[in-house]
Every structure is written in structure tokens, then in C-alpha cells.
Image (tube, grey):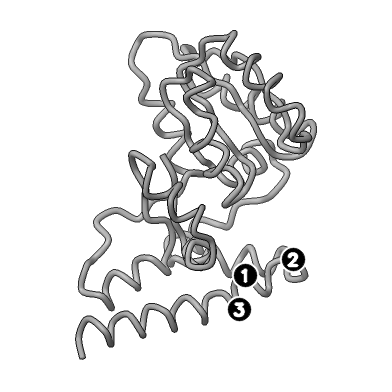
Amino acid sequence: MCFLNAHYANQACANPAYRRALAQADLVLADGSGLALAGLILKNPVRENLNGTDLIPWLFKELPSQRVKVYLLGARPGVAEKAARCLRGIHPKIEIAGWHHGYFPEDQTQEILARIALHKVDVLLAAMGAPKQELWLAEHLPETGAGLGLAVGGLFDFLAGEVPRAPLAWRGLGIEWLWRLFQEPGRLWRRYLLGNFLFLHRVWRQSRERFP
């Protein structure tokens, strides 16, 4: 399962392998006001606007009575461990099978795959950023033996308290992206200022093709 926002859509337009990974996913969920606006412009409204930071903890809270084994893969060293401790507190039936940061060399991939497979996990959370996490899951999920692979972006950073969430009012208005821009302008200005303009331009061009 993957999420798609305006930034990810821009990357998919320029990356055929990423597009294929999204097409292969069992479920791709719209995330953010950009996708909602695009749906309105293209006369195909988004039914549910979701993001992994809110949805994944909610899903775990709604777990049935049986135990669920979860493995966390991604983020910087130390962050996944903090996120794992947070997940443990969400539901008593969550069993953290293990974790590993996302900054591992290619020659360590098989070792990590074997470790995940050894634990026979139900859910693998991959937080390596797009498109790396989607490409990694598309290529390696069957080798892990996990029943479900979720590409979760910055979820671990939020759970671990490394990155603050926007206030509820900002989220309700659909401008969490603006909050993040204020928090990290040097890193995110291209993504949100230039990227949002590029995304809307692409949506406008597509609308002209569909509705001349």
C-alpha cells in the first residue's frame, strides 16, 4: 500500500520505474490538498483524503484481537527504534519484530531481507522516502514474507518526535504542507513552491486535454 501526494506525483511523472511500482501496488491512497484539488479540476473527486501519519496509527488502534507482528525499516539510525516504542503503546497486540534504519548499503539488502523473513512478520513499514520505499517494496516485499507492505514516508520521524506535526487547525484547512515549509524552508522550498506550481500546471494541461 502506498500514498500519493503532489510531490510524489511530480516524481512519478519523471520516473517510469516509480510509476510501475505505484501501478503494481494493491492500493494507492490520495494524500493531501493537492490531490483533492486535482480531483475537482479533473471532475474525479477524491473520496477520502488520507495520509500515513494519521492512517497507520488509526489502523493499528483498530486491530482485531490477534497479535500482529510489525517490522520497521527506514529513517535515520535510532529513529525507527523510537517509533517502535511509540507503536507498542498504541495497541497491546502489536508485537515489534524488529527495526533497521534506512541508510544501509546495497550489499546489506540480503541480510536485512533474511532478518525480516526470519521473524515472519505480518506488516512491514518502509519509511525511506519516495520513490525509494515504493521501489524497494515492489522488488523485495515477496522475499520478506510479510503479509502487507506499507510505504509510510516520514511516519517514523513523526512518531519518534523528530519532526513536529502541524497544529490540528492547519491540518483541517489542508495546509500542513505550509507548516512543514515554515519548519524546514531550506530543504522544502523547491518541493512545495516550485513543485506545487508544476503539479497544478500538469493538472491544468490534463484538464485541457480531457475537456477541450
> Residue 40 at what x, y percent from top left?
26, 73
> What type is the residue that disc 1 sits on?
Arg
The alpha-carbon separation of the residues under discs 3 and 1 comes to 6 Å
Residue situated furthest bottom in the rendering: 212
Does residue 17 sit above or below 95 in this rendering? below
Give the quadrant of residue 157: top right
Specify the label residue 193 is tagged with. 3
Assign a secondary structure to mark 2.
Answer: helix
Give the quadrant of residue 44: bottom left
The one of 65 and 77 positioned closer to us in this rendering: 77
| Residue of label 2 | 187
> Residue 28 at what x, y percent from top left?
37, 48
> Residue 210 at what x, y percent from top left?
22, 81
N-terminal-most mark, 3 or 2:
2
Residue visible at 60% across and 52% down in the picture: 165
Residue visible at 34% across and 66% down in the picture: 36
The answer to the question of whether label 2 and label 1 lie on touching residues, with beta carbons closer than 8 A, is yes
The answer to the question of whether label 3 and label 1 lie on touching residues, with beta carbons closer than 8 A, is yes
In the rendered image, the quadrant that contains the N terminus is top left
| Residue of label 1 | 191
Residue visible at 52% across and 44% down in the picture: 134
Give the quadrant of residue 212: bottom left
Q: Is residue 77 left or right of residue 24?
A: right
Residue visible at 46% across and 43% down in the picture: 54
